[in-house]
Image (cartoon, rainbow, N blue to C red):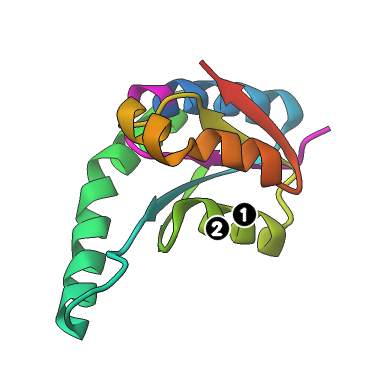
Amino acid sequence: MHKKILHGLDGSEGSLRALIEAIKLAQCYAAELHTISVEELPHYPGAIGEVVEEKIAANGKFSDALEKARQIAKKENVELITHVIIGHEVKTILEYIKKHNFDLLVIGFMGHSALYDRVMGSTCQSLVRLAPCSVLVVK
């Protein structure tokens, strides 16, 4: 039985389909539902100002997706707790799961860039392999 569910939101259609499934599970199990969006910083920022600018941009980048997610959850009478965190996507999500004791991660199968996934490796595959909890991948 799942009591704490974490959903990964990147704004893609796949992540929104995953949200709908996460909402259904939260309703079924009366579980707490969170969604997390992770903005990756450049690997070698030229100056501190660039890091600050990236953080501001990250909050703006996900604001539309988070608002849409909140509206979907509200329509289903489910409270959705949202988080935007700066960091490496896979590492940040894994640390967040461990720190907050989630027992289920719900993610979409395909994010923004299928080409990036083919070249660099799939975030989805990494999370399935490394997560300390059950993972539901929604197509």
- Nearer to me, 64 or 135: 135
Whether the magenta-drawn stretch holds residue 115 is answered as no
Residue type at numbered disc 2: Lys
Residue 102 or 25: which is nearer the viewer? 102
Residue, x 41% and y 29% (percent of image)? 118
Residue, disc 1: 94
Could you tell me residue 90's position as x and y percent?
A: 52, 51
Q: Quadrant of residue 72?
A: top left
Look at mark 2 in the image and give the residue it sits on. 91
Note whether residue 66 is visible. yes
Boundaries of the magenta span? 1-14
Extreme residue in the front direction = 119
How packed is label 1: few (under 14 Cα within 10 Å), some, or many (20 or more)? some
Q: Is mark 2 on a helix, strand or loop?
A: helix
* Kind of residue at badge 1: Leu
Q: Relative to residue 121, is residue 24 drawn left or right?
A: right
Taking the image as shown, residue 72 lies to the left or right of residue 125, namely: left
Q: Is mark 1 on a helix, strand or loop?
A: helix
For the residues bearing labels 1 and 2, Cβ distance under 8 angstroms: yes
Q: In which quarter of the image is residue 99?
A: bottom right
**Which of the image's four quarters has the N terminus?**
top right
Taking the spot 68% from the left edge, 60% from the top edge, the residue there is 100
75 or 107: nearer the eye? 107
Q: Residue 61 carries which label?
A: none
Q: Nearer the viewer, residue 54 or 46?
A: 46
Q: Position of residue 85 (x, y in %)?
A: 42, 61
Number of callouts in the render? 2
Residue 77 visible at all: no
Q: How would you rate the neighbour count of disc 2 (Cα within 10 Å): few for under 14, some for 14-19, many for 20 or more?
A: some
Q: Percent from the top left, x then y, of residue 41? A: 31, 64
Which residue appears at 61% of the width and 41% of the height? 127
Distance Cα–Cα, label 1 vs label 2: 5 Å
